[in-house]
Amino acid sequence: QVELVESGGGLVQPGGSLRLSCAASGSIFSANVMGWYRQAPGKERELVASFSSGGRIRYGDSVKGRFTISRDSANNTVYLQMNGLKPEDTAVYYCNIKLGLLYSSSYWGQGTQVTVSS
């Protein structure tokens, strides 16, 4: 079993910054992908960014150049630095970890609200 604990959401003005953190605990295999997804009201959940244990990083098109993902593999923690926030970034942000054969096991955090508004 894997548990993900997120922190760092909140209310920020347009153009501001926030940093999200997610710590994973439990049966964490060394090969895994940790990442962030988000879901806005009435929309599907979408990839924000992911970082594999092998060093591969992916970003969603809408956040490229503004968000930066990083990870501390020794502590199974992933971070999301969000700069230049826009109202359309408002969503619940979920931490995710994929592991196991073909990364077929997927676990989610409880979600943290990010609201960008003046």
Image (tube, rainbow, N blue to C red):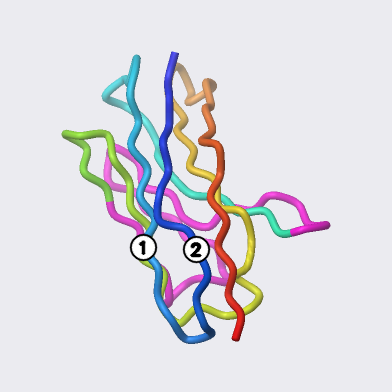
Position of residue 74 in the picture relative to residue 51 (left or right) = left
Name the element at disc 1.
Answer: strand
Residue 9 image offset from top left, x and y in percent = 47, 58
Position of residue 17 in the picture relative to residue 62 (left or right) = left
Position of residue 47 in the picture relative to residue 98 (left or right) = right
Q: Which residue sits at x=55%, y=37%? A: 110
Q: Taking 17 as reference, is 1 above or below it?
A: above
* Label 1 vs 2, first from the N-terminus: 2
| Residue position for label 2 | 10
Q: Classify mark 1: residues with Cα within 10 Å, few (<14), some (14-19) or many (20+).
A: some
Quadrant showing the C terminus: bottom right
Residue 7 or residue 1, whichever sits in front: 7
Residue 17 image offset from top left, x and y in percent = 40, 75
Three-letter amino acid code at disc 1? Arg
The quarter of the picture where residue 32 lies is top left
Residue 117 or residue 102, whichever sits in front: 117
60 part of magenta stretch = yes
Name the element at disc 2.
Answer: strand
| Numbered range of the magenta stretch | 41-70
Q: Which residue sits at x=63%, y=67%? A: 90
| Residue position for label 1 | 19
Mark 1 and mark 2: Cα distance apart in space: 10 Å
